[in-house]
Amino acid sequence: MADQINSLEELGGAVTADIGGVQGTEEQAAPREPVRDSLGRAYATGKRKDAVARVWIKPGSGKVTVNGKPIDDYFSRPVLQMILKQPFQIAGVVGQFDVMATVAGGGLSGQAGAVKHGVSKALQLYDPTLRAALKAAGFLTRDSRVVERKKYGKAKARKSFQFSKR
């Protein structure tokens, strides 16, 4: 313990010297490769609540199709359309990819979230350089919140029946 470390730079140098320079070197981490099929598409599965979306993206004019319908017909509320377009805005590739998605289960809100999750995962598979922005925005993480189940002796999950003193 003769050497005293006074700054973060010295601490970083000491750690890499102790390990032998293995950790902290940039040669160790292999760069991510794009994952595309024979047609040049990237595929990903997105989930939210009870909804599951299978999403394919390919370079195009920005056309979005969900279950064979245009986005305006399937998600008629502007809020749901906005949710679906968020990954493109964060990644800065608005109008550069065509999206074909099939969604099953849940309601419209959960389905929009599932397509958003699937699009985000497919974008980072198609172009790994977009991963940092999508991950920082939290779009690559599955939102694990689901509806709490109803318990016996209760009106709903937590609500009790009206209490009667007499």
Image (cartoon, rainbow, N blue to C red):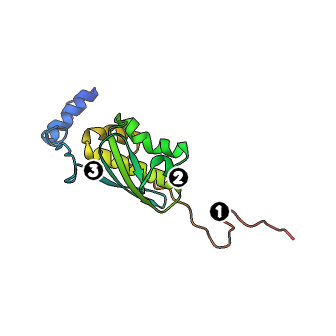
Residue drawn at the location 35% of the way across and 33% of the way down: 92
Q: Residue 72 location, x and y as percent? A: 49, 46
Q: Taking the image as drawn, is residue 4 in sight?
A: no
Quarter of the image where one finds residue 12: top left
Quadrant where the C terminus sits is bottom right
Which of pointers 3 and 1 indicates the residue nearer the eye?
Answer: 3
Residue type of the residue flagged with mark 3: Ala
User: Total label count?
Assistant: 3
Q: Residues within 10 Å of mark 2 (few under 14, many from 20)?
A: some
Q: Nearer the viewer, residue 105 or 62?
A: 62
- Residue under pointer 1: 158
* CB contact under 8 Å: marks 3 and 1: no
Residue drawn at the location 74% of the way across and 67% of the way down: 161
Q: Is residue 47 left or right of residue 11?
A: right
Q: Is residue 155 left or right of residue 87?
A: right
Which of pointers 1 and 2 indicates the residue nearer the eye?
Answer: 2
Residue that extends furthest to the bottom in the rendered view of this protein: 152
Image vertical order of residue 93 relative to residue 84, above or below: above
Label at residue 109: 2
Q: Residue 50 location, x and y as percent? A: 48, 61
Q: Is residue 85 left or right of residue 41?
A: right
For marks 1 and 2, the one nearer the N-term is 2
- Residue under pointer 3: 42
